[in-house]
Amino acid sequence: SAIRITHRPSGIVVTCQDQRSQYKNKDRAMSVLRARLLEQEQIRQSGEIASDRRSQVGTGDRSERIRTYNYHQGRVTDHRIGLTLYKLDAILAGGLDEIIIPLQTADRADQLSQGTGPAEDV
């Protein structure tokens, strides 16, 4: 009255011989198999979420600077693309296009080099 169930895609094998009835053993083995498959899927998903989170969250070091505003020299430096502008007053007054356009260009070039298309502007 023992039952052995093998899930072919994952290779998980479940055996059950708790009950005297083969049908009850089959039901029990199927529920154990479902639980193991669910657990395996949850582990896979949590691993993906953790890797996504690690890629989005930096370490907080100074080496991860995005932009530096140097008021004494009137300079703005965007460290992501290596852009330095000596127009601090204009940028603080709202002229961010001089920074945004090169950032968008660099992002598009990066996406093309990775083989992904440009993201949709929302």
Image (cartoon, rainbow, N blue to C red):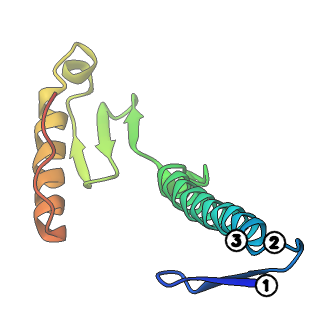
Q: Is residue 37 left or right of residue 52?
A: right
Q: Residues within 10 Å of mark 3 (few under 14, many from 20)?
A: many
Q: Nearer the viewer, mark 1 or mark 2?
A: 2
Q: Residues within 10 Å of mark 2 (few under 14, many from 20)?
A: few
The secondary structure type at the circle numbered 1 is loop
> Can you identify the residue that label 2 sits on?
21
Q: Nearer the viewer, residue 3 or 110?
A: 3
What type is the residue that disc 1 sits on? Ala
Q: Which callout, 3 or 1, points at the residue further toward the start of the chain?
A: 1
Instruction: Give the CA distance from mark 3 to mark 1.
Output: 8 Å
Q: Which mark is residue 39?
A: none
Residue 24 position in % (x across, y down): 77, 65
Query: What's the residue at 11%, 60% (across, down)?
Result: 109
Residue 90 position in % (x across, y down): 19, 20
**In which quadrant will I find the C terminus?**
top left
Q: Nearer the viewer, residue 25 or 107?
A: 25
Residue 26 position in % (x across, y down): 70, 71
Q: Which mark is residue 26?
A: 3
Furthest toward the front, the residue is: 21
Q: Is residue 50 left or right of residue 66?
A: right
> Can you identify the residue that label 1 sits on?
2
Q: Which callout, 1 or 2, points at the residue further toward the start of the chain?
A: 1
What type is the residue that disc 3 sits on? Lys
